[in-house]
Amino acid sequence: MPDSIVELQNVTKVYTLGSNEIYALNGVSLSIKKGDFVTIMGPSGSGKSTLLNMVGCLDLPGEGIVRINGTDVSTLSDDELTTLRRDNIGFIFQQFNLIQTLTAIENVEMPMIFNRMDADARRKKALSLFKQSNLEVEYADHRPNELSGGQQQRVAIARALANDPPIILADEPTGNLDTKTGESIMALLGDLNSKGTTVIVVTHDPRLAEYSNTAIRLQDGEIYHGSGEKNQ
Amino acid sequence: MDLVKRISSNMYVELAKRNLKRHAFRTILAAIGIIIGVIAISSMGILGNSLKLSVSGSLGDVGNEIVLYPAYGETVITEKQVDDLSKVGDIEYIIPLLSSAARAEYKDEETFTNVYGIERDDLYPLVELEDGHFLRSGSKDCVVGASLADDLDLELGSRLTVQDSQLRVVGILKESGFGFAIDPDRATFITPEAYEKLFDDEEDGYNTVIVKVKDLDDVETVAESIEERLNKKEETVTVLVTGTILESIDEIFNSISLFLMGIGSISLLVAGVSILNVMLMSTMERTKEIGIMKAVGASRNEILKMFMLEALFLGIAASLIGGVLSFGGGFLVNILILDDASYLFAPSSILYIVAGVMFGIITSLAGGMYPAWKASNMRPLDALRYE
C-alpha cells in the first residue's frame, strides 16, 4: 500500500503491572492514507494513547510492524526516531506542553532550531504560522503562562506545523478547553487537513468525530468498529 | 563581532541563561561553591609560589659550579687529589680553599667570620670587588665580604683582628647573597701562607675545592668524570653540583605548591558535587520539558548540549569571579603567613590563578556531565508522562 502514510500490522503492546499482563494493544492493524482526518476514540484504558504513541514514534511495538511514510520504525535508533519525528510528525497535546522558559514565538521556532534552520528564516516562518493559527502577533513575546488556554493551544499548533510535517497527531486537543474554543481549534485542524495534512486525533468526545472522515474505535486494545482499511 | 552576535542570539545560549536565572538562588549557591574552590586553589598556589620566590630570592647567583668536600671519614682533600683533578677535561678553574670559622674583632665590635685561605689569582673567578684591590701574595692583607665590612664598620686600611693576628683590609667585596660553596658576604679572604700561620694545627690539604667548567652544559659530565677519577676505589670526596641543589630546592617548593593546591582542590571537589546535585535536581524538574523537546525533534546531542552549556556558563562565571577574588585571598595568606605580599603579582603567581580558574571550569563541566547525560538519555514517552 504505497499510498498509506501510517501503517500498523498486527501491533501488540503488553505492559506488566505486578504479575498481571495488560494488553494495551492486541493485534491492531490499520492503514491511514495521506490526507486522511482520523479520530481514534474509546474509553479510558482502551489503548488509544498507546496507539497514538506508536504512530508518533514515542513508543515501539512489542510485536508487529509500524511503518511511517514507508519506514519500519523498529529498525531505527533513538536519534533516527527523533529525526523521523522532527521531519514527519507534529504533536499537539492536551496540556499544550509549551516550554515555560521560552516565549510563544520561541516555542514555535524550537522545532526549526532542531532542524538547523537559520535565525531569520525561522522567525519569518514562525510569524506566518502565528497568523495561520489565528494568533495575534502581539502575543509573540509573551510567555506561555501569560496566555489563555486557547491561545496556548494555538501556539502548540503553530509549533506542530513548524517543520511542515505531513502528519499531525493530537491527543485530546480540546480536553482542557471550553466548548467554543475547542470548536475553533477543531476547525483549525480541519482547515489544515483540507490543505493536505494527515490529521490523527485521539479523543473520547464523540462530537469531534464529525470533523473526521474516518473514525476508529478501540476497546480493550482491539479495534472495535470501523477502520481506515475497512472503510475503503 | 559577527560571531559574538551569533552566539548571544543563539537559542541554546539564551535557554541556558534563562534556566540558570529561573532558580537564581540555587544557581548562586552552586556558584559560591565554585568561587570558594577557585579562591582556595589559587591562593594556596600563590602561597606556595611566594614561599619559593622568597627563598630563592635570598639565594645568591649560585651559578653552576662543582664543589668538592672531603667524604665522610676523610678530613681534607689532598694536594695529590687536586693534581688528579687537573687531569679531568673541560675544567676552566680549580680553586682549592682552606677554611675555618673564626672570631673577628675591630675596635669594640666583634663577630664571626669564615676565613678562607686562597691564592690571589683564584679570587678573580670567585668574587667581585666593590672597593680596593685583591691580595698580594705573602702579605698580611685581607679582602672582606660586604656584610662583614658593614657589621664591623670596616674600611680600606682598617686593621682587623682574627685569631689574635692583625690583618689589613685591602679590598671590600660586592654583596653577592648566600652561596653553597662559600659565603662571600661574611668571608675574610687571606693568602694560604697567612692562613697557615693563623691556623697552624691544620692538616696538610684543603677543606673545599671549587671547580668551574668551561661550558655550563657539560657540568654533569665533568662531575661524573671527577667521581670516576677520585672515587674509583672508595668514596674519598663528595661531589656536589650547585645547580642541581637549586633544582632540588625548586622541586621541593613545587611539591609544596602542589600539596597546598591539593588541599584547596578538596573544596573544589565539594563544589563539583554540589553542581552535580543542582543540575540533577534541575533535570528532574525539567523531565517533562525534555520529553517535549525530544517529541518535537531534539536529538540526544542537543539535549546534552543544552545542559552542558548551563554547566559551562555557571563554571565560567563563577570561576572568573573566583579568579578575581583570588588576588584578595592570595594577599591575605601571604600577609598572614609570609608577612610580605610583594610576590602576589609575580607572573608565576598569576599562572596559579589561571590554573585555579581552569580547574573551576573543568569541575563545573565534570559536575554537569552526568545530569546532562541522564537528561539526554531519557525516553521521550516516560519524560512526557512525568508530572
Image (spheres, helix red, strand yellow):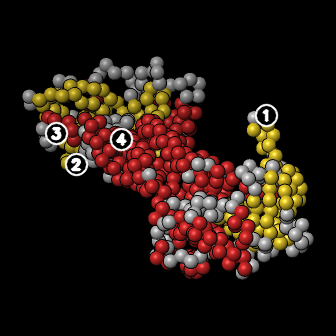
**Which mark sits nearer the N-terminus, 2 or 4?**
4
Circle 2: residue type: Glu
Residue drawn at x 58%, y 56% as measured from the top left: B289
- Do callouts 2 and 4 point to residues on the same chain? yes
Residues at marks 1 and 4 touching, judged by CB atoms closer than 8 Å: no
Q: Nearer the observer, disc 3 or disc 2?
A: 3
Circle 3: residue type: Asp
* Badge 4 element: helix
Q: Is residue A40 above or below residue B287?
A: below
State the separation of the CA atoms marked 3 and 2.
13 Å
**Which mark sits nearer the N-terminus, 3 or 2?**
2
* Badge 2 element: strand
Picture coordinates of residue B278, whole percent (x, y): 50, 45
Residue drawn at x 72%, y 76% as measured from the top left: A193
Tell me if residue A205 can be seen. Answer: yes
Residue named by callout 3 = B150
Tag 3 subunit: B
Residues at marks 2 and 1 touching, judged by CB atoms closer than 8 Å: no
- Do callouts 3 and 1 point to residues on the same chain? no
Picture coordinates of residue B316, whole percent (x, y): 45, 55
Residue named by callout 1 = A19
Q: Residues within 10 Å of mark 3 (few under 14, many from 20)?
A: some
Residue drawn at x 42%, y 24% as measured from the top left: B76
Q: Nearer the observer, disc 3 or disc 1?
A: 1
Picture coordinates of residue A76, whole percent (x, y): 80, 59
Residue named by callout 2 = B130
* Badge 3 element: helix
Q: Nearer the observer, disc 1 or disc 4?
A: 1
Q: Residues within 10 Å of mark 1 (few under 14, many from 20)?
A: few
The answer to which image quadrant residue B224 occupies is: top right
State the separation of the CA atoms marked 3 and 1.
97 Å
